[in-house]
Amino acid sequence: MLLVGTPLLALFAPWTEALGATTGVVCVWLAARSDFWTWPVGIANNLLYLVVFWQSRIYADSLLQLVYVAISLYGIWRWRSGRGEFAVRPVERVGAAEKWTVLAVVAALAVVFALLLARWSDSDVPWADGLTTALSLGAQWLMSRRMLENWWVWIVADVIYVPLYLYKGLQVTAGLYAVFLLLCISGLIEWRREIEARGTAATTAVEPATLG
C-alpha cells in the first residue's frame, strides 16, 4: 500500500481517476441491464479506485475496493447459477426479515468503520467515509444476489458520495457518482420491470389451465 503514494503513481493519478470513472459508468450501465459483463468491468474499476482513494486519504473506500473484488467473484458465480449455460439468475426482492437484518448490519458497520478511521487514520471525513463504505458493502452484496433493493441502497450512498468527493477535490469522481445516481434510478426501473414482466408471464401461463 505504501507504493500508492510514490511520485510515479502520483504522476498517473489523473489518468487513473479518468479510467476509473469510465469503467465505473460502463459497469453500472451493464448492471442496470442485467449484463454479466458488469462484474469483470467492475473488478477493473475497483483496482483503479483502490489507488485513487488511497491517494486521497479515503482509506475505508480504498480498502473497500478489495472487498468489492471478492464480492464480484461471488457475483460472477451467483449470476451464472440460473438455468441454462448462459442464463442469468432472475431478479428477486428482499424479504421483510432480511431487510431489517441488512439495515442493522449496515448501521453497525458504519459506526465501527467510522470509529476505526477516527482512531487509527488521518482521515478528515471518518463518519462520511464509514457510512458510505457500509452502504456500499450492503448494496454490493444485494446486487451480487440480484436483489432489487440494491438500487435503493446505492442511491442513498451516491447522494452522500457526490458532496464527499467534491470536498476531497475529486471533481471527476464526484461527477461520476452523479452519473451513477442517474444510472441507479434507471437500474431500479429496469429491474422492477423485469420482476413485473415475470409476474405477468406467470399469470398468463396459469390462466389457460385455470379456464380449462
Image (cartoon, rainbow, N blue to C red):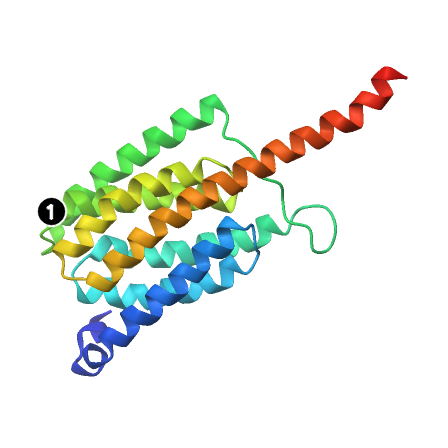
Can you say whether 26 is above or below 131 in the image?
A: below
Q: Residue furthest bottom?
A: 8
Image position of 150 (left or right of 162): right
Q: Quadrant of the C terminus?
A: top right
Residue ID at (20%, 81%): 11
Image position of 65 (left or right of 194): left
Crowding near pointer 1: few (<14 within 10 Å), some, many (20+)? some
Q: Residue furthest top?
A: 211
Quarter of image, res 121? bottom left
**Residue 126: % across, % down:** 14, 47
Residue ID at (49%, 37%): 148
Can you say whether 16 is above or below 77 in the image?
A: below
Please, what is the three-letter code of the amino acid marked with disc 1?
A: Ala
SS at circle 1: helix
Instruction: Give 12 or 212, whichever is nearer the viewer.
Output: 212
Can you say whether 24 is above or below 89 in the image?
A: below
**Residue 186: % across, % down:** 45, 45
Which residue is labeled 1 in the image? 118
The reply to whether residue 141 is in sight is yes
Instruction: Give 170 or 40, whichever is nearer the viewer.
Output: 170
Q: Quadrant of the N terminus?
A: bottom left
Quarter of image, res 92? top right
Image position of 79 (left or right of 66): right
> Total of numbered circles in the picture?
1
Residue ID at (47%, 64%): 41
The reply to whether residue 134 is in sight is no
Image position of 22 (left or right of 124): right
**Residue 12: % across, % down:** 24, 79
**Residue 178: % across, % down:** 29, 52
